[in-house]
Image (cartoon, rainbow, N blue to C red):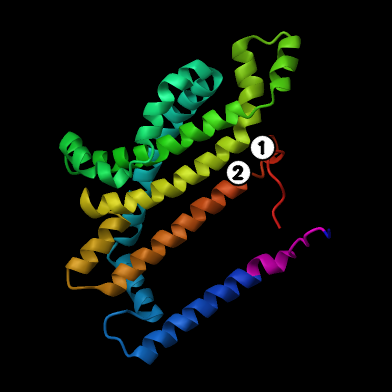
């Protein structure tokens, strides 16, 4: 079979930009053709973003959402990676904990909103807690699977070199599992970014999620609703691209196949 052709550098930028322009053109002409008075045009959305910027709300709302995600996701990373590595390292412990883990993991973080409000009230703590829950379980599962999939020959070779269990875990098992852990972190961050929007619609009075519901309820400003939606999408794309860059580090690059 012929190898996949690597896209040229200019193509990596040209085609996404062209697709974006086509999307904006279709959006504009769909609004003109339908003569809708409700759904905003791209120009109206641009003006809405400019209005938010002039009022000093744009960067404040973006910063609040990113701060909440950073706190919740950061807490999930700090706690989830050690828990996942420990469960992967000790299969007996994993057998004990796994039923509870698998029972809690499918529960949507949105379902926790009433309990979170009871526990923490309406505010940042509730939103951060929901984000933490959203990211924690994917990180733990990725770490457990990463450790479990490390070839047994790695452990045997390390013992032959006289490594103690702690050195084996830090110098061999964790680096070998790191590619899979990064994939889990990427998935967890995407889920966390989804959950912050839902949490901000209910539990706080700032952020991009709050902007969506507030613009809808206060004067039916659908230009600001769509503006918030686009900002959420663009920032989510930027966060995902940042994790893709992380995969290019030499310490983890070996674990990924080159993408076409």
Residue depicted at 25% across the width and 57% down the height: 210
Query: Can residue 205 be seen at all in this image of the molecule?
Result: no
Q: Is residue 232 left or right of residue 56?
A: right
Residue 115, percent from left and from top = 20, 38
Q: Residues within 10 Å of mark 2 (few under 14, many from 20)?
A: some
Residue 171, percent from left and from top = 65, 21
SS under mark 2: helix
Q: Which residues are magenta?
A: 3-13
Residue 2 vertical position relative to residue 105 in the rendered view, above or below: below
Q: Quadrant of the N terminus?
A: bottom right
Q: Are marks 1 and 2 in contact (CB under 8 Å)?
A: yes
Residue with the mark numbered 2:
246
Nearest the camera: 211 or 105? 105
Please tell me which of labels 1 and 2 falls first in the chain: 2
Q: Is residue 165 left or right of residue 153?
A: left
Q: Hey, which quadrant is residue 46 in on the image?
A: bottom left
Residue 83, percent from left and from top = 46, 24
Residue 80 vertical position relative to residue 258 in the rendered view, above or below: above
Residue depicted at 21% across the width and 63% down the height: 214
Which label sits on residue 71? none
Nearest the camera: 245 or 176? 176
Residue with the mark numbered 1:
252
Residue 218 vertical position relative to residue 30 in the rendered view, above or below: above
SS under mark 1: helix
Residue depicted at 25% across the width and 38% down the height: 125
């Amino acid at each position: 079979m012929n190898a996949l052709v690597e896209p040229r550098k200019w193509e990596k930028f040209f085609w996404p930009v062209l697709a974006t322009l086509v999307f904006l053109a279709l959006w504009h002409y769909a609004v003109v053709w339908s003569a809708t008075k409700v759904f905003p045009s791209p120009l109206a959305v641009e003006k809405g973003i400019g209005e938010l910027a002039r009022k000093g709300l744009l960067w404040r709302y973006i910063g609040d959402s990113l701060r909440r995600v950073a706190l919740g996701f950061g807490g999930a990373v700090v706690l989830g990676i050690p828990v996942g590595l420990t469960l992967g390292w000790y299969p007996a412990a994993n057998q004990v904990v796994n039923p509870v883990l698998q029972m809690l993991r499918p529960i949507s973080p949105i379902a926790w909103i009433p309990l979170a409000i009871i526990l923490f009230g309406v505010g940042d703590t509730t939103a951060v807690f929901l984000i933490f829950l959203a990211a924690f379980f994917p990180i733990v599962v990725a770490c457990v699977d990463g450790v479990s999939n490390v070839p047994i020959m790695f452990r045997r070779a390390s013992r032959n070199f006289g490594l103690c269990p702690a050195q084996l875990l830090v110098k061999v098992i964790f680096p070998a599992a790191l590619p899979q852990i990064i994939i889990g972190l990427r998935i967890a961050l995407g889920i966390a970014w989804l959950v912050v929007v839902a949490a901000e619609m209910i539990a706080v009075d700032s952020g991009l999620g709050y902007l969506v519901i507030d613009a809808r309820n206060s004067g039916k400003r659908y230009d600001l609703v769509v503006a918030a939606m686009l900002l959420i999408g663009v920032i989510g794309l930027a966060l995902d691209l940042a994790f893709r860059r992380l995969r290019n580090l030499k310490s983890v690059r070996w674990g990924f196949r080159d993408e076409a």
